[in-house]
Amino acid sequence: MSSTADSTYVGTRPVSPQHAFDEGKLAAFIRDQVTDFQGALTVSQFKGGQSNPTFLVQAGTQQYVLRRKPPGVLLPSAHAVDREFKVISALAGTDVPVAKAHALCQDPEVIGTDFYLMDYVPGRIFWDPKLPDVPAHERPALYDELNRVIAALHRVNYQAVGLGDYGKPGEYLARQVARWTKQYRAAETERIEAVDNLIEWLPANLPVGDETSIVHGDYRFDNVIFHPTEPRILAVLDWELSTLGHPLVDFAYHCMTWRMDGSTGRGLGDLTPEQMAQMMIPSESDYVKRYCTRTGRDGIPERDWSYYMVFNMFRLTGILQGVMKRALQGNAASAEALATGKRARPLAEQAWRMVEQMRAA
């Protein structure tokens, strides 16, 4: 799997001690579940990822990816690998590219926690949305493909593909505000005033109107695999946070890339419009218009869009706080987890500044 990331995130490493398991039991399970599985099994761990530990499993010429729940005490409803398995199985055959799912295991006797097995998909993963290693003239097509696939996901008839029970239709935002407030409090390691302000403001200012589609929950460049040479996505990864929800909330999370900078994550927020044009990266407004065209929308009300953006910054703050909590407990999936967790405060403060700008307007 080639990538434009540095060695911090790219490739595999030996399985970390806290994530080690009985590889013999795993081999026996795979032989029972996967046709034509043969040869000696080897396991290595992918460097990237903050939540569910992910492994490359090889046997002979066959390669698979294993996603498991992390060990230790977990937040309620988090790390639901069974839901990941269900959604990628359901999306096979739609316009949303996914890896082939092979087997789900919920027997703790095998490797200690739930896991599932899917095909390994070779290709390119871009960790930096500035695409520094891609020629400028190739960037527009990569962004357009990223846009096409999330629009395709939001157009999938979730009832028709067997995901009618994948979440609760309606009132998604209200439930999400409550859920991520609870998740944040469960993982809180220090008091952040901006988070307290957001927890008070968000439920009191919910936008009117509702829609329901399949939502990914963490759609971004480094959660898709591009073809090795073409601007074509071969598989969307990391469905842990997927559910039935509001498509515009999901899309706004994806578009936080245009608001985030080095202090809050990998993003485009430190680029001027002139720099983005020179780099041939679409502006946020152009990207949103393209999505609206693909999904049959006339546009998105500005105040609603700002709310969705603020909520998603709050939600990501909760995710980052969970990473920090696991880092302090010593069972985080990535060696960079502590640094990742420290992004929570500046992101929450940026979100609260947006609220103050909305109030002023």
Image (cartoon, grey):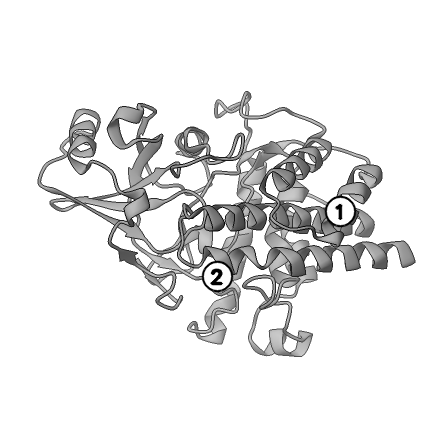
Horizontal side of 171 relative to 74 (left or right) equals right
Give the residue at mark 2: 142
Q: Tag 2: residue type?
A: Leu
Q: Nearer the viewer, residue 290 or 271?
A: 271
Q: Find residue 203 and report its image quarter.
A: top right
Q: Find residue 97 and report its image quarter.
A: top left
Q: Earlier in the sequence, mark 2 or mark 1?
A: 2
Image x and y of residue 29, in percent: 20, 28
Horizontal side of 86 relative to 341 (left or right) equals left
Name the outermost residue toward the right.
360
Marks 2,1: beta carbons within 8 A:
no
Quarter of the image with the C terminus is bottom right
Crowding around mark 1 (Cα neighbors within 10 Å: few <14, some 14 to 19, many 20+) is few
Give the residue at mark 1: 196
Q: Nearer the viewer, residue 82 or 110?
A: 110
Q: Tag 1: residue type?
A: Asp
Q: Nearer the viewer, residue 35 or 141?
A: 35
